[in-house]
Amino acid sequence: MRTRFFAAALMCCFALFSPMAVVAAEKEPSILSVSGSGMVQSTPDQATITIGVVTQGLTAGDAQQENAVKATAIREALRTLGIEDKDIKTEEYNFRPEYNREGNERVIVGYTTSNTIRVRVRDVTMVGDVVDTVLTSGANTIHSLDFSIRDTNALRQKALESAVKDAREKANAIAHALGSRIIGVQHVTENTGMFQPRQSNMMVMTKSMDALAESTPIDGGTLSMTADVHIDFILAQ
Protein backbone atom coordinates (compact mmCIF):
# COMPACT_ATOMS: atom_id res chain seq x y z
CA MET A 1 0.00 0.00 0.00
CA ARG A 2 2.77 2.35 0.96
CA THR A 3 4.63 1.45 -2.19
CA ARG A 4 1.66 2.33 -4.41
CA PHE A 5 1.17 5.65 -2.54
CA PHE A 6 4.82 6.58 -2.92
CA ALA A 7 4.73 5.72 -6.62
CA ALA A 8 1.61 7.84 -7.14
CA ALA A 9 3.15 10.77 -5.31
CA LEU A 10 6.31 10.48 -7.35
CA MET A 11 4.31 10.53 -10.59
CA CYS A 12 2.48 13.66 -9.45
CA CYS A 13 5.79 15.37 -8.81
CA PHE A 14 7.05 14.42 -12.26
CA ALA A 15 3.84 15.76 -13.76
CA LEU A 16 4.00 18.99 -11.76
CA PHE A 17 7.56 19.85 -12.68
CA SER A 18 7.54 18.46 -16.18
CA PRO A 19 8.44 21.04 -18.89
CA MET A 20 5.09 20.32 -20.49
CA ALA A 21 3.32 21.43 -17.33
CA VAL A 22 5.31 24.63 -16.66
CA VAL A 23 3.33 27.71 -17.71
CA ALA A 24 5.41 29.71 -20.13
CA ALA A 25 6.41 33.11 -18.79
CA GLU A 26 4.81 36.03 -20.49
CA LYS A 27 6.96 37.71 -23.12
CA GLU A 28 8.22 41.21 -22.50
CA PRO A 29 6.02 43.69 -24.35
CA SER A 30 7.37 45.28 -27.51
CA ILE A 31 8.21 48.94 -26.89
CA LEU A 32 8.32 51.72 -29.45
CA SER A 33 10.22 54.82 -28.25
CA VAL A 34 9.30 58.07 -29.98
CA SER A 35 10.10 61.74 -29.37
CA GLY A 36 7.77 64.61 -30.21
CA SER A 37 8.10 68.39 -30.31
CA GLY A 38 5.59 71.18 -30.03
CA MET A 39 5.78 74.96 -30.25
CA VAL A 40 3.39 77.81 -29.54
CA GLN A 41 3.76 81.49 -30.27
CA SER A 42 2.19 84.46 -28.55
CA THR A 43 2.51 88.21 -28.50
CA PRO A 44 4.24 89.71 -25.43
CA ASP A 45 2.09 91.54 -22.90
CA GLN A 46 4.79 93.39 -20.98
CA ALA A 47 8.20 94.95 -21.49
CA THR A 48 11.15 95.83 -19.31
CA ILE A 49 13.20 98.89 -20.19
CA THR A 50 16.55 99.51 -18.52
CA ILE A 51 17.57 103.14 -18.75
CA GLY A 52 20.66 105.00 -17.66
CA VAL A 53 21.30 108.51 -16.35
CA VAL A 54 24.95 109.54 -16.50
CA THR A 55 26.03 112.96 -15.20
CA GLN A 56 29.39 114.63 -14.72
CA GLY A 57 30.54 117.54 -12.61
CA LEU A 58 33.66 119.27 -11.42
CA THR A 59 32.73 118.42 -7.86
CA ALA A 60 31.18 115.30 -6.36
CA GLY A 61 28.18 117.31 -5.24
CA ASP A 62 27.57 118.69 -8.72
CA ALA A 63 27.59 115.24 -10.36
CA GLN A 64 25.36 113.71 -7.71
CA GLN A 65 22.93 116.61 -7.58
CA GLU A 66 22.42 116.75 -11.34
CA ASN A 67 21.87 113.00 -11.43
CA ALA A 68 19.33 113.15 -8.62
CA VAL A 69 17.40 115.93 -10.37
CA LYS A 70 17.22 113.99 -13.63
CA ALA A 71 16.30 110.71 -11.94
CA THR A 72 13.50 112.44 -10.05
CA ALA A 73 12.22 114.06 -13.25
CA ILE A 74 12.20 110.67 -14.97
CA ARG A 75 10.18 109.08 -12.17
CA GLU A 76 7.67 111.92 -12.19
CA ALA A 77 7.31 111.72 -15.96
CA LEU A 78 6.74 107.96 -15.79
CA ARG A 79 4.03 108.45 -13.19
CA THR A 80 2.21 110.80 -15.54
CA LEU A 81 2.13 107.93 -18.04
CA GLY A 82 0.49 105.70 -15.46
CA ILE A 83 3.60 103.70 -14.53
CA GLU A 84 3.30 102.73 -10.86
CA ASP A 85 6.12 103.15 -8.36
CA LYS A 86 6.36 99.36 -7.88
CA ASP A 87 7.33 99.08 -11.56
CA ILE A 88 10.19 101.59 -11.25
CA LYS A 89 13.33 100.20 -9.63
CA THR A 90 16.89 101.42 -9.22
CA GLU A 91 19.11 98.63 -10.54
CA GLU A 92 22.52 100.16 -10.01
CA TYR A 93 24.07 103.38 -8.74
CA ASN A 94 27.73 104.25 -9.27
CA PHE A 95 29.87 107.22 -8.37
CA ARG A 96 33.49 107.60 -9.36
CA PRO A 97 36.14 110.29 -9.67
CA GLU A 98 37.70 111.00 -13.05
CA TYR A 99 41.47 111.25 -13.19
CA ASN A 100 43.98 112.88 -15.49
CA ARG A 101 47.68 112.22 -15.37
CA GLU A 102 49.90 115.24 -14.82
CA GLY A 103 53.48 114.15 -14.86
CA ASN A 104 53.82 111.25 -12.47
CA GLU A 105 50.65 112.07 -10.57
CA ARG A 106 46.99 111.28 -11.13
CA VAL A 107 44.84 114.34 -10.55
CA ILE A 108 41.09 114.33 -10.08
CA VAL A 109 39.51 116.45 -12.81
CA GLY A 110 35.86 115.70 -12.14
CA TYR A 111 33.27 113.16 -11.02
CA THR A 112 30.79 110.88 -12.79
CA THR A 113 27.54 109.55 -11.39
CA SER A 114 25.59 106.84 -13.17
CA ASN A 115 22.13 105.66 -12.22
CA THR A 116 20.50 102.63 -13.85
CA ILE A 117 16.71 102.36 -13.58
CA ARG A 118 14.54 99.43 -14.62
CA VAL A 119 10.99 100.17 -15.73
CA ARG A 120 8.30 97.54 -16.25
CA VAL A 121 5.70 98.52 -18.83
CA ARG A 122 2.52 96.46 -18.48
CA ASP A 123 1.01 97.82 -21.70
CA VAL A 124 3.31 97.11 -24.63
CA THR A 125 1.57 99.73 -26.78
CA MET A 126 3.12 102.35 -24.48
CA VAL A 127 6.74 101.28 -24.94
CA GLY A 128 7.50 103.92 -27.56
CA ASP A 129 5.97 106.66 -25.42
CA VAL A 130 7.95 105.48 -22.38
CA VAL A 131 11.23 105.54 -24.31
CA ASP A 132 10.54 109.05 -25.60
CA THR A 133 9.48 110.27 -22.16
CA VAL A 134 12.55 109.06 -20.28
CA LEU A 135 14.90 110.43 -22.92
CA THR A 136 13.33 113.87 -22.85
CA SER A 137 13.26 113.83 -19.03
CA GLY A 138 16.98 113.30 -18.53
CA ALA A 139 17.94 109.73 -19.43
CA ASN A 140 20.82 109.57 -21.88
CA THR A 141 21.08 105.81 -22.36
CA ILE A 142 18.69 102.94 -23.04
CA HIS A 143 20.64 99.85 -21.98
CA SER A 144 18.09 97.21 -22.96
CA LEU A 145 14.50 96.57 -23.96
CA ASP A 146 13.03 93.12 -23.20
CA PHE A 147 9.59 91.85 -24.20
CA SER A 148 8.04 88.99 -22.21
CA ILE A 149 4.77 87.29 -21.18
CA ARG A 150 3.38 87.41 -17.65
CA ASP A 151 1.42 84.14 -17.43
CA THR A 152 2.77 81.24 -19.49
CA ASN A 153 0.92 78.28 -17.89
CA ALA A 154 -1.79 77.94 -20.56
CA LEU A 155 0.76 78.33 -23.35
CA ARG A 156 3.04 75.73 -21.79
CA GLN A 157 0.11 73.29 -21.70
CA LYS A 158 -0.62 73.89 -25.38
CA ALA A 159 3.03 73.29 -26.26
CA LEU A 160 2.99 69.99 -24.36
CA GLU A 161 -0.24 68.89 -26.02
CA SER A 162 1.27 69.65 -29.41
CA ALA A 163 4.40 67.67 -28.53
CA VAL A 164 2.38 64.64 -27.40
CA LYS A 165 0.27 64.79 -30.56
CA ASP A 166 3.43 64.89 -32.65
CA ALA A 167 4.84 61.85 -30.84
CA ARG A 168 1.60 59.89 -31.19
CA GLU A 169 1.35 60.59 -34.92
CA LYS A 170 4.91 59.39 -35.42
CA ALA A 171 4.27 56.28 -33.34
CA ASN A 172 1.08 55.44 -35.25
CA ALA A 173 2.90 55.71 -38.57
CA ILE A 174 5.77 53.50 -37.41
CA ALA A 175 3.46 50.92 -35.83
CA HIS A 176 1.36 50.75 -38.99
CA ALA A 177 4.48 50.22 -41.10
CA LEU A 178 5.48 47.37 -38.76
CA GLY A 179 2.06 45.76 -39.03
CA SER A 180 1.40 46.37 -35.35
CA ARG A 181 -0.72 48.69 -33.23
CA ILE A 182 -0.35 50.73 -30.07
CA ILE A 183 -2.12 49.34 -27.01
CA GLY A 184 -0.68 51.47 -24.22
CA VAL A 185 2.02 53.75 -22.83
CA GLN A 186 4.84 52.52 -20.64
CA HIS A 187 6.75 55.70 -19.81
CA VAL A 188 6.70 59.42 -20.59
CA THR A 189 9.26 62.16 -20.01
CA GLU A 190 8.89 65.82 -20.92
CA ASN A 191 10.99 68.93 -21.18
CA THR A 192 9.27 72.27 -21.54
CA GLY A 193 11.27 75.35 -22.38
CA MET A 194 10.65 78.84 -21.12
CA PHE A 195 9.62 81.85 -23.12
CA GLN A 196 12.84 83.68 -23.77
CA PRO A 197 12.34 87.43 -23.58
CA ARG A 198 12.99 89.13 -26.89
CA GLN A 199 15.89 91.46 -26.19
CA SER A 200 17.03 94.57 -27.91
CA ASN A 201 20.31 96.04 -26.74
CA MET A 202 20.33 99.76 -27.32
CA MET A 203 22.56 102.74 -26.69
CA VAL A 204 20.32 105.69 -27.43
CA MET A 205 21.40 109.23 -26.67
CA THR A 206 18.91 111.98 -25.93
CA LYS A 207 16.76 112.78 -28.94
CA SER A 208 16.97 116.16 -30.54
CA MET A 209 13.98 118.47 -30.34
CA ASP A 210 13.31 117.97 -34.07
CA ALA A 211 12.90 114.23 -33.48
CA LEU A 212 10.26 114.62 -30.77
CA ALA A 213 7.35 115.26 -33.08
CA GLU A 214 6.50 111.56 -33.36
CA SER A 215 6.58 108.69 -30.91
CA THR A 216 9.27 106.08 -31.42
CA PRO A 217 7.61 103.03 -33.09
CA ILE A 218 8.51 99.84 -31.23
CA ASP A 219 6.91 96.50 -32.09
CA GLY A 220 6.89 93.65 -29.59
CA GLY A 221 6.66 90.95 -32.27
CA THR A 222 6.01 87.37 -31.11
CA LEU A 223 7.65 85.00 -28.62
CA SER A 224 7.95 81.23 -28.90
CA MET A 225 7.83 78.39 -26.38
CA THR A 226 8.85 74.82 -27.20
CA ALA A 227 8.12 71.50 -25.49
CA ASP A 228 9.67 68.08 -26.05
CA VAL A 229 8.37 64.69 -24.93
CA HIS A 230 9.75 61.17 -25.10
CA ILE A 231 7.14 58.41 -24.94
CA ASP A 232 7.58 54.63 -24.77
CA PHE A 233 4.52 53.10 -26.46
CA ILE A 234 3.49 49.46 -25.91
CA LEU A 235 2.82 47.55 -29.11
CA ALA A 236 0.45 44.64 -29.58
CA GLN A 237 2.17 41.26 -29.92
Image (spheres, helix red, strand yellow):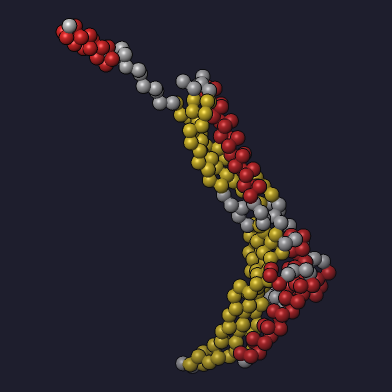
The one nearer the camera, 195 or 62, is 195
**Residue located at (67% from left, 83% from top):** 67
- In the rendered image, residue 237, in percent from the top left (x then y), is placed at 46, 20
Picture quadrant where residue 7 is located: top left
The one nearer the camera, 122 or 146, is 122
Is residue 134 depicted above or below 20 in this figure?
below
Picture quadrant where residue 197 is located: bottom right
Is residue 123 depicted above or below 95 in this figure?
above
User: Visible in this render: residue 142?
Assistant: no
User: Visible in this render: residue 148?
Assistant: yes
Left or right of 209, for residue 234: left
- In the image as oriented, which residue stretches furthest toward the right? 213
- In the rendered image, residue 85, in percent from the top left (x then y), is placed at 71, 72
Is residue 195 depicted above or below 172 in this figure?
below
- In the image as oriented, which residue stretches furthest toward the left? 3
- In the rendered image, residue 211, in percent from the top left (x then y), is placed at 79, 70
The one nearer the camera, 149 or 184, is 184
**Residue located at (48% from left, 33% from top):** 186
Q: Count the labels in the image.
A: 0
Left or right of 28, for residue 225: right
- In the rendered image, residue 82, in percent from the top left (x then y), is placed at 78, 68
Q: Quadrant of the N terminus?
A: top left
Picture quadrant where residue 36 is located: top right
**Residue located at (74% from left, 69% from top):** 83
